[in-house]
Amino acid sequence: MVDVAPTPSRPKFALPQLQDNPVGWGPCEVPEQFKDTPYQPFSKDDRLGKVADWSGNVYQDRRAANKYGSLYGLGGQAYVYHHEEDETSFQLVDTGRIPKPMHQKSRPKFSQLKIKRDREKRDERRMGGRQPIAKKKGREWDRQRQQQQRKRNQFGYSYERGPVVLKPRLPSVQVSTDWDVLEEIDFARLAKLNYQPEEPRELHFCGSLGYYDVQKEKKISPRNPLPLQYQERICHKVTTTDDPIIRKLAKQGEGKVFATDTIVATLMACARSQYSWDIVVTKVGDLMFFDKREDSRFDMLTVDETTKDPPQEEGMNSPDSLSTEATYINQTFSQQMLTKDPPLDLSNPNPFIGEGDLQSKVGSVAYRYLRWNLKDNSGLVVRCEYDAVVPQPGGGKSYINIRALNELGPKKASSGIDWRKKFEQQKGAILATELKNNSFKIAKWALTSILAQASYIKFGYVSRIFNRDNSKHEILGVQQVKPLELATQMTLDVPNAWGVLLAVIEACRALPVDEDRTAKYLVLKDPNKPVVRIFRVPKDAFEGSDGSDESDGGGSQD
């Protein structure tokens, strides 16, 4: 019997436990041996390098040196060892040069100055006794620079001056101690108001309008300016309660709130104002009348009211003097730009012409009385104005308003642009600067034209002939702007303006009255704060005023 060698035992193969991943591929959980092991994250866009490189400098070309280099580990710094040293003994060393004091600085020696003077003399002899042109110009510039510096020192001007310190302004009317503050409206509360009334209804149209001279406008330019000439015309500025047409409409029950376009525009744009102004509100039963005070400066124009550096000088360039000058320029320019043709007489005559006034001496103006329905169905009646009429092809007519922007002279221009030199090339920049420096005044002009539904506004640019003479002016040019486009350009929100007006009317309507259902209030803009206060005043206040209540520090408005 043959012995058979036993079969050696074969190695056992244990089938590993497979995990079924129903939602993807790969293991479902971390194996036990790999748990709590630090893991270095890597990016999938890392290049795979060689397993081993025994030669070192294999690639002679530097561009191929990193061809198979791995970027693994460049972005992950989670497990990099940082050696923290004691930095208490660390001291930053300043390697810069230490500046020498003035007494140790080297100065040009006498011999060096002598050599320089001898060289200049040789150059002068070589040129026949004449100095080099560059040297002459340099000395001339130095002399002009010294003269300008002396002028700045004389008048207190400096390019590196600090913030302008504004003088405290005085209110437009002296507030009495027995006046009670009934309401205080902060301008910040007015920004979110919004209201849009329906289209107005015309109640009355009267006056006489001159024709605008288009041919004269085309001839005006900075190279061919037109001198501003005094026009002997009467311009009536009648308040609300003195208007016979408004009294008649109030008796007929056409509305419950009555005002002029200037007063309404002032309330609409009050958030842009800086100077003090005031409006008298008279309550008679259900009727309210918004008036200006007698002998007040409410109809006067302001100059550079909203600029960063408003006028604070004395004399000819004081706020009151500039206000008088701007008002004179505006009235004169509006009458000078008319033709000599017979005016257009409307169906109703001017209600403010007295028996002794001549029609030829009265300025060109038309009054249009419009009525708007407010929220509570109460009527707002406003007297609007036009300055001129422009005939259109086909027999139509366009009613327009004429306004003037004035410059104090080339060296006094607040815009920094000389109108005489830059008007034709930078007309838009000049208007944009005026919108910034006179935001309140131009906003009221835009709103009065929007209320009157004027076709457009004619802006005249008027400048002093001499900086120190405020009596002689020249017209440099005229620009035409539509009222709504002007409001858009100066970011004037018309629905917000209506919302502000409605808020003031409702605030006045809610104020208390006497037993006879009458009362008088004063709406006063604070001269130094963006606040409007409503005071309760006696019924006989401001009657027969001689102007003593008017201060000289609050500015003036139109």
Image: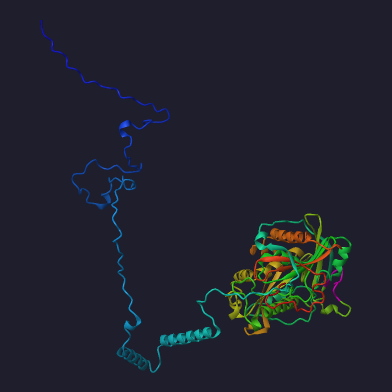
Residue 98 screen position, x and y as percent = 32, 74
Q: Give the quarter of the figure containing the N terminus.
A: top left
Q: Position of residue 192 (x, y in %)?
A: 66, 57
Examine the image and state in which quarter residue 322 appears: bottom right
Apparent side of residue 154 relative to residue 220 in the rendered image (left or right): left
- Is 228 in front, or is 23? 23
The answer to if 345 sits in the magenta stretch is yes
Q: Quadrant of the C terminus?
A: bottom right
Counting every numbered tag in the picture gives 0
Horizontal side, residue 344 vs residue 502: left or right = right
Side of 105 relative to 202 (left or right): left
For the question of whether residue 468 can be seen, the reply is yes
Residue 173 percent location from the top left of the image:
73, 74
Q: What colour scheme has been applied to the protein in the rendered image?
A: rainbow
7 up-or-down from 446: above or below:
above
Residue 282 visible in image: no
Point out the residue furthest to the top here.
Answer: 1
Q: Residue drawn 65% across and 72% down?
A: 305
- What segment is highlighted magenta in the picture? 344-353
Q: Quadrant of residue 28?
A: top left
Give the residue displayed 40% in from the left and 90% down from the top. Answer: 131
- Relative image position of residue 181 (x, y in whole percent): 73, 65
- In reply to whether residue 270 is colored magenta, the answer given is no
Q: Nearer the viewer, residue 373 or 548?
A: 548
- Left or right: residue 377 versus residue 10 is right
Instruction: Please name the residue shown 18% across and 44% down the image.
Output: 54
Relative to the observer, which residue lies in front, 260 or 174? 174
- Above or below, 68 against 289 in this view is above
Q: Main structural element of the magenta stretch: helix, strand or loop?
A: loop
